[in-house]
Image (cartoon, rainbow, N blue to C red):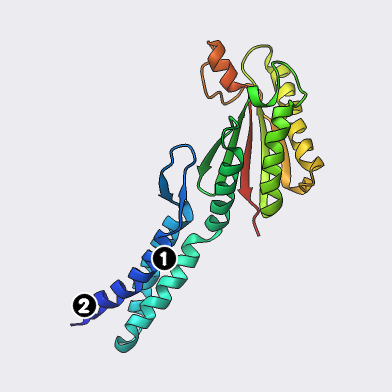
Amino acid sequence: MALKLNSAALGGALMGTVLLLSGCQTTDPYTGEAENSKATNGALIGAISGAVIGVASSSKKDRKKGALIGAASGAAVGGGIGYYMDAQEEKLRKQLQSTGVTVTRNGNDIMLNMPNEVTFEVDKTELSQRAKDVLNSVVLVAQEFDKTKLNVFGFTDSSGSESYNQRLSQVRASEVAQYLTSRNVAGSRVVATGMGESKPIASNDTPQGRAQNRRVEIVLTPIEG
């Protein structure tokens, strides 16, 4: 009898929570598919865990109430900063759709990959107008979500000396960072790092591969505390 009561309490608590959270879906503008956000998945897991704890820690007559409270608390904890980053990711995807910039989510980090054709001409360090337009869109989101750090990484292909490529990548990363701060993104939130020819994402043996390796990445991470 106790097992049936536990199951009923868990089922009733989770049904409402799952229905609420399952509505928290985002649509990928590139595929058109709806998918649960990362935070929603975390919240669902938290809700299940919280409901179980709520039932276990409640008296027999209060198990249903305990399950409800536990599910709600677990969902909030399970979602956490993920909700904040989910909303930011969705806005970035909308702002950057059809710009040539890809948006990739890794845990609570959001990476914007800006290929060289968007940012700089070959062997140049001046931002193109296309790059400025893209960065203006990033700024709009960054100003709204001010609890995020913007880590700017510059990359080159392997043409030329390693030391030259390192300097070039640092200058390019700094150019992007300076543009962001010139548009009122706090300097304390922006960090520029030159990566040189390290971490290629394609082969440097072909023109197409080298073009992919020449890029700027902006990785948005939650500010701790």
Q: Which residue is drawn at 62% across and 44% down?
A: 220
Vertical arrangement, residue 44 with respect to residue 14, above or below:
above
Q: Of the two numbered discs 2 and 1 on the same chain, state the one appearing first in sequence.
A: 2
Q: Are marks 2 and 1 in contact (CB under 8 Å)?
A: no
Q: Which residue is drawn at 57% across and 37% down?
A: 97
Between the C-alphas of marks 2 and 1, the distance is 26 Å
User: Where does label 2 land, which residue?
Assistant: 3
Along the line of sight, the residue nearer the viewer: 151 or 180:
180
Point out the frontmost of discs 2 and 1: 1
Q: What element carries label 1?
A: helix
Q: What element carries label 2?
A: helix
Residue 155 visible somewhere in the drawing: no
Q: Which residue is drawn at 56% across and 45% down?
A: 109
Q: Residue at x 58, y 16 (%)?
A: 210
User: Where does label 1 land, which residue?
Assistant: 20
Q: Position of residue 45 (x, y in %)?
A: 39, 61
Left or right, residue 129 beside residue 15: right
Quarter of the C terminus within the rendering? bottom right
Vertical arrangement, residue 21 with respect to residue 171, above or below:
below
Quarter of the N terminus within the rendering? bottom left
Amino acid carrying label 2: it is Leu
Residue 111 appears in which quarter of the rendering? top right
